[in-house]
């Protein structure tokens, strides 16, 4: 094989021969350095291995190598007096000078093993301390929240009669929401409900079903909401006025709230607006055990033009549901409704009433009886309202009737934003969904300065009834 420049360089460079025979190094880097052309070295040249040689004392000083790379023809190792022995051409495999070989051999003596044992000792101490801390100190993992545990329970076991009341109430309002939306959709099949499912970071969520600008309803909303949260001490003290079962010494309490809320604003001024809301509230200990609970709710009718037969039918449906459980419920809750939906600054009621109740707890009846009462009230809504909207949705009307409807809806907005406790509670709840809360407001309303209905008109008759509630059944 013909001699190449690397082979020639190998035969005359003793340090390359020693490096190859004694250490398994990458000689390619040494080749590259020696065979490179004359170019200025970089400020930080690539490192390469050079064997350490202990030269004899020099008899004369020699200049240091320049900062430029030498060409192959001028390469020569800078050593002392034995330079001639180093650069003498040597055949491949020929032994290098004994002096250089001796310096490359490891020094004899007892190996230093103390550092090895020291590393093992420190490693054992570290592992031992970690194991000790894991055994003696329990892991402080975050316990699952009540909302998470309820979600697992519903997924694994479903909701049965033995489930906590909060899960049974949640299942009830969701079933009724589907039933009501399906019935209302049949009145206006062309305008589909928009259905939004939302969740809360702290737990819970809801489903909002809304229809706007339809043939029957200008705006119709049927919402369910499930809320998990924490009551601070001031809220607990305020609720203890009506619920003595709340722990007076607790700094905070977990709570659960579930409700079905419905508001229907028809297009036709002859068809009445209707509102419904049934809810359940519960406070819990950290382990999810019920601490206190109560039910609330009601439904009421708000016509723009009064038809006595509509009011009578609506109230009779509610009364039948109440009488199944307690004959005192209807007169008591009807009076509560007339008082609650009164607009003080107008000195009139919002509508012709219905029933309203709140804070029904163990002092009223047991939990199962009140749950059955709320279930029957929800079941009476469609039979009480569908015949009314079916009769009135296609009646003729003109601009005058539409203008009066807008005025009455202005009163509806005033009550909801100023006096309604449910709207206030929702807007002040952290993480509340504002769009769902304000779903109850009509799409359009009107405020006219110093508006007075004509004497003897249908508008005046309604206003007189609103200022003096009537016993319809």
Image (tube, helix red, strand yellow):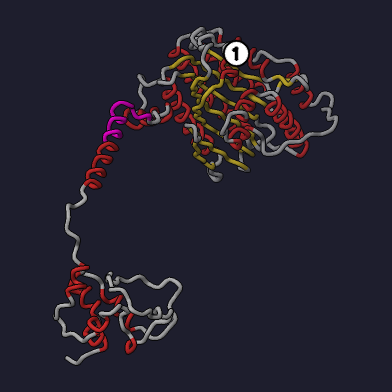
* Viewer can see residue 305: no
Left or right: residue 40 compared with residue 19 = right
User: Which residue lies at the image location 69% right of the left edge and 37% below the top edge?
Assistant: 396
448 in relation to 455, above or below: below
Residue 382 point in image, percent of width and height = 53, 27
Q: Quadrant of residue 146?
A: top left
Q: Residues within 10 Å of mark 1 (few under 14, many from 20)?
A: many
Nearer-the-camera pick, 249 or 325: 249
The residue indicated by pointer 1 is 333
Q: Is residue 293 magenta?
A: no
Residue 342 point in image, percent of width and height = 71, 19
Left or right: residue 111 compared with residue 407 = left
Residue 199 point in image, percent of width and height = 49, 36
Q: Quadrant of residue 133?
A: top left
For the C terminus, the quadrant is: top right
- Span colored in magenta: 128-140
Nearer-the-camera pick, 34 or 253: 34
User: Which residue lies at the image location 52% right of the left edge and 20% below the top edge?
Assistant: 252
Q: Secondary structure at mark 1?
A: helix
Q: Is residue 134 magenta?
A: yes
45 in relation to 285, above or below: below
* Viewer can see residue 76: yes
């Amino acid at each position: 094989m013909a001699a190449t420049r690397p082979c020639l360089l190998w035969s005359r460079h003793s340090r390359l021969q020693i490096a190859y025979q004694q250490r398994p190094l990458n000689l390619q880097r040494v080749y590259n350095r020696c065979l490179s052309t004359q170019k200025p070295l970089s400020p930080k040249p690539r490192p390469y291995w050079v064997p350490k040689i202990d030269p004899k004392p020099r008899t004369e000083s020699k200049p240091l190598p320049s900062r430029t790379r030498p060409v192959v023809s001028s390469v020569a190792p800078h050593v002392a007096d034995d330079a001639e022995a180093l650069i003498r051409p040597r055949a491949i495999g020929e032994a290098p000078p004994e002096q250089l070989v001796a310096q490359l051999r490891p020094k004899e003596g007892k190996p230093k093993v103390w550092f090895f044992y020291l590393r093992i000792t420190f490693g054992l101490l570290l592992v031992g301390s970690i194991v000790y801390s894991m055994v003696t100190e329990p892991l402080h993992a975050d316990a699952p929240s009540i909302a998470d545990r309820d979600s697992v329970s519903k997924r694994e076991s479903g909701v049965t009669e033995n489930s906590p009341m909060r899960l049974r109430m949640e299942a009830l309002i969701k079933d009724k929401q589907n039933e009501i939306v399906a019935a209302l959709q049949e009145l206006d099949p062309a305008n589909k409900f928009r259905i939004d499912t939302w969740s809360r970071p702290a737990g819970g969520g809801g489903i909002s079903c809304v229809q706007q600008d339809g043939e029957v309803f200008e705006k119709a909303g049927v919402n369910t909401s499930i809320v998990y949260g924490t009551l601070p001490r001031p809220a607990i003290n305020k609720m203890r006025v009506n619920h003595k079962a709340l722990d007076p010494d607790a700094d905070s309490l977990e709570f659960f709230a579930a409700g079905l809320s419905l508001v229907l604003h028809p297009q036709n001024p002859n068809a009445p607006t209707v509102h419904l809301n049934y809810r359940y509230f519960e406070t819990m200990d950290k382990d999810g055990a019920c601490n206190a609970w109560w039910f609330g709710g009601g439904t009421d009718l708000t016509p723009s033009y009064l038809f006595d037969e509509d009011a009578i039918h609506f109230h009779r449906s509610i009364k039948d549901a109440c009488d199944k459980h307690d004959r005192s419920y209807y007169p008591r809750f009807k009076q509560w409704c007339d008082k609650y939906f009164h607009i003080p600054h107008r000195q009139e009621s919002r509508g012709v009433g219905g029933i309203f109740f709140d804070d029904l707890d163990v002092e009223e009846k047991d939990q199962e009886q009140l749950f059955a009462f709320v279930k029957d009230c929800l079941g009476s809504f469609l039979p009480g309202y569908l015949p009314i909207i079916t009769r009135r949705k296609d009646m003729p009307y003109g601009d005058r009737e539409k203008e009066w409807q807008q005025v009455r809806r202005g009163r509806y907005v005033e009550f909801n934003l100023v006096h309604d406790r449910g709207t206030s509670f929702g807007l002040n709840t952290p993480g509340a969904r504002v769009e769902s809360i304000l779903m109850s407001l009509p799409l359009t309303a009107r405020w006219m300065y110093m508006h007075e209905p004509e004497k003897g008109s249908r508008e005046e008759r309604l206003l007189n009834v609103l200022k003096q509630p009537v016993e319809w059944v």
